[in-house]
Image (cartoon, grey):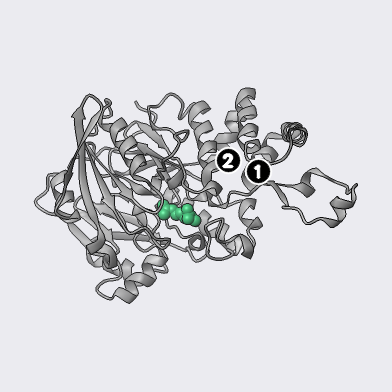
Amino acid sequence: MDKLSINSEIGKLNKILLHRPGFELDRITPEDLKEVLFDDIPWMSRMRKEHDGFAKVLKETGTEVLFVTDCLLEVINNNEQAKKELVELALEEVQYDNITINGLREFLLSLDNKELIRCIIAGLSESEVKSSRVTLSDYMQDKYPYYFKPIPNLYFMRDVGVVIKNGVALSRMKTPIRRRESLIVRLIYKYHPDFSGVPVYFDNKEEKMSLEGGDVLILSKECVLIGFSERTSLEGIDKLASNLLNSNSGVKKVLAVKIPHERAFMHLDTVFTMVDYDKFVIFPNILNDIEVITITSGGKSTLKYEAEENLKTALAKALNLPSVKLIKSGGSSSVISAREQWNDSTNTLAISPGVVITYNRNEISNEILDRNGIKVLSIEGSELVRGRGGPRCMSMPLVREDIDF
Ligand SMILES: NC(=O)NCCC[C@H](N)C(=O)O
């Protein structure tokens, strides 16, 4: 049996990777918000309770839940080389002289493994390393407090890597603040026995392009959608499409889907997710701005492109269905749709065909899903949503049961 198996967006979910919001989020200050891609300071104890609620629903519905920090701990407990690589990926970001960097390396390697992981995720402040102030500058100069910064978006596990079929695309993050997240996950894929050795369809060492997991949707065994968004570049789409289509991944068609490039919907999955065999939920206010191009292999590592009439017909064609239904999140009111999309009404996580996890705050969109025959398992998300992501953004599905279309 394959270690990873994702052949659709909706097959019964068996195994998933999450990150419980940790100390990295306790370090966000109002001045950081823009840089760290948040819109507000979360209430942390509430946020952790909400995340625990999310994990509980997943477990209760029969999904095995793995946590990044546990996987990383297993890796570095058993592999000195991996531990050194973990330290180096944080040190790469330190903009100090070599003597300081060598001192930091020694400091980090002396930490207990759990503490090291906490530090790599929550950042390392000067005060944690220097216990006393010795120079006038230590006393009087304002210094940037971190050698390397906290990475508060790690709980949005969807974006840092995405399982496609029996392999993975390790994301090349667009923004510097999210790069370390994906390098951490890369280490897990390199060394952890549950992940190592799987095909890598995209590597985050790629330069001059970006690809984030929130833009990738596995429509079926043969078709993958990739959003052209604020975060994923055309070069990133071409690269992943080429690797999937010109390998033995089994993918025969990639749909490139252009959405408006805006903060409110930075990834495809913030405006569009699949909820059943033939049903999708969509943010209706952007429906007319979407463009779709079908990409297929042109042989000898080349690609062929063909413009589609619209998203609805392209989806039906790709799924070999007479038609599909696009359910309007928020209904026909553009005001309600915009308000609920901002709080991730469209970012549903399907745990089996026709059953999704959503935030309970999006009452109107949830009711519309219900009226369309979708079973909604709703969770609290008032604090989780402050980073602008929902249940799909917060999860990296690893294994789903296969379904027949
Ligand atoms: N797939 C997603 O849309 N993920 C949400 C990412 C939110 C995060 N604060 C970001 O801006 O990258």
Amino acid carrying mark 2 in the image: Thr
Q: Nearer the viewer, residue 252 or 115?
A: 252
Instruction: Tell whether label 2 touches label 1 (CB within 8 Å).
Output: yes
Q: Which residue is mark 2?
A: 69
Q: CA distance from mark 1 to mark 2?
A: 8 Å
Work out which residue is located at the far left of the displayed protein and give it: 322
Q: Nearer the viewer, residue 154 or 148?
A: 148
In the image, residue 339 sits, relative to residue 24, either above or below, namely below
Disc 1 on helix, strand or loop? helix
Disc 2 on helix, strand or loop? helix
In the image, residue 313 sits, relative to residue 302, either above or below, namely below
Image quarter hosting the C terminus = top left
In the image, residue 46 sits, relative to residue 301, either above or below, namely below
Amino acid carrying mark 1 in the image: Arg
Q: Position of residue 110 (x, y in %)?
A: 76, 32
Could you say which quadrant of the image residue 30 lies in?
Answer: bottom right
Q: Position of residue 20 (x, y in %)?
A: 55, 49
Q: Position of residue 290 (x, y in %)?
A: 25, 57
Q: Which residue is mark 1?
A: 118
Residue 294, numbered label: none
Check disc 1: other Cα within 10 Å, few if <14, some if 14-19, many if 20+: some
